[in-house]
Amino acid sequence: MFPMSTSRPLLSFFLVGCAALVLASAEPASAQEPLILQMADGRYYHPASGLIASDKSILLKHIGAGQTAIKVVEEVKVSAPAPAPVPEKPLVLRMADGRYYHPGSGTIAPDEASLLARIGWSGSVGTVIGQNTRPVAPILNAVYRAQDELRERIKSQGKDKRYPMAPVGQDTPRNVTIAVWNKVTDQISYVEGVKSGRDLEIEGGSPVGISVRLTNWINSDYATSDPNHVVVAVRYPIFHEIKEGTKVIRYDVEEAVYTPYNKTLHQADVIVEGERILDETIQKAAQDLKNRGIGSRALSGKGVTDTVSPDLIKALVVIEHVGSSEARGNPAAATGKVFATIGLNPGQAYNYAGSSAGAFGLAQFIPSTYNRLAARPELGLIPDFQAGMRDHQNAMKASYAYLDAVLGELPAAAKNLPAENTKLFEYLAAAYNGGSSKVKTAIQIWDEQISGELQPHQILTRSRLHGETIDYVKKLRAVLPVILGDKAPTPPRPASSI
């Protein structure tokens, strides 16, 4: 499998770009010889196909070239960029997904001309540093282009900040913009309409037959009658209720841009990218806690990231956003659905997901639990609940801290288990769902209670897990083999225990 990236602009673009400029001056291979570039990290890249491999022979096999019929140009190893002089022309970076980025203003646009227009550059074309060589899937390219364009339209209309509106009712029809990608031409069209539940009225009609397959506010599932056209993003107004006491006095409207999950978008490239993003977010959260020197509240002498496995946090993200029947019926598809949603909405996935209990966002914390953690200044959490949950790295930091705290409330038999022990995963997941008080006394009859061997009336009240918590653990057992892969324990649990 060839690696892909849809990373937002980082210093690495500058490093790769500098090397790309050096390569541009190298002597080109003859027309008969495929050009192979060795990159700074040692991997090999074939520009004509966009393929990358860690081994040259593997890459040659995929492009169908012989071992001798190549020309390899070694890339200059750049340890750090030299200080750049003040340019006469604006510096523009072409990113891995094909979009263009201006570091000076932070502006992003789908093409170079649009970017230069947005930054007000009317002279000759600015310097363009070459594209990162890690390819991005066409479907993700289309999604990100559409999202950027919709956000730019919102900004140009002066609606990139929340604005007030009379409280007309949450069921009021909403003006939406739907981005539709043509898979054949790679063009994206933007369709204006009015949505009310499953009813969708398109201005001037829709030539590709856009309809609402399933209504769920911003997460509604859109379909087209033409299989070559795919809905890749939606602009949707969110009505945030502002209250005085219990009375709603106005709405603060947020013009949100999102790509709702649907089966058309459930593709391997999207799932892989979403899992990569989640893994990276969890890793960055752990590194931040390590950098802060956050010690464990459960085990003396250890760090908070030593007591909680990143695989557990990853699994909890999945089971918070899938139902019991889908998790246990097809755990691979259920897990892929969550990863795909994250891949389609980097940094935004589940930012509008809330429960009747007040749980919110990717990590589904409730305000009271999060606020207790945010009151610990050493953690460096964002004070505001919604802002903290919408910042995914911050949310993962809160997950680490909370799970370590509840581990400290469990008996020694649980504390002494290795962080990667799947039984410990279950104890902590149950506490994540329903608090630690019941878990502490339920451990001695754990499997009998989860499997149903012991019915509720046979269990003392203080040891009786809530039915929702039992179901939560069953979801965890279902998806863990998918999450852990080769690390999954063998033999697997018998079906009766699930």
Image (tube, grey):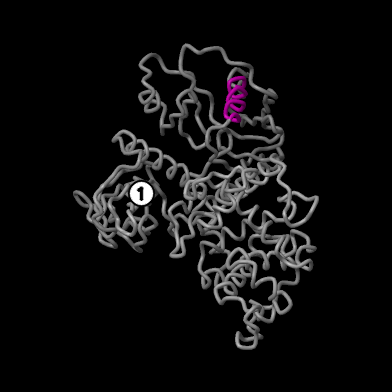
Q: Nearer the viewer, residue 392 or 175?
A: 392
Tell me the SS state at disc 1. Answer: strand
In reply to whether residue 18 is colored magenta, the answer given is yes
Image vertical order of residue 191 relative to residue 428, above or below: above
Tell which residue pokes out farthest to the bottom in this image. Answer: 458
Majority SS type along the magenta span:
helix
- Specify the amino acid type for callout 1: Val
The residue located at (60%, 74%) in the rendering is 470
Q: Badge 1, how many Cα within 10 Å: few under 14, some, many 20+?
A: many
Q: Is residue 346 visible?
A: no
Residue 178 seen anywhere in this rendered image of the structure: yes
Query: Quadrant of the image for the C terminus?
Result: bottom right
Residue 184 belongs to magenta span: no
Residue 51 at x, y = what percent? 60, 39
Q: How many marks?
A: 1
**Which span of residues is magenta-colored?**
11-23
The answer to which quarter of the image holds residue 82 is top right
Camera-side residue of 18 and 246 = 246
Image coordinates of residue 450 in percent, x first then y, are: 64, 78
Instruction: Please give the name of the residue rendered at 60% of the width and 42% of the height, measured from the top-left corner.
Output: 380
* Tag 1 residue: 234
Is 387 situated above or below 353? above
Q: Residue at x 70, y 56 (%)?
A: 309
- Residue at 74% across / 57% down in the picture? 298
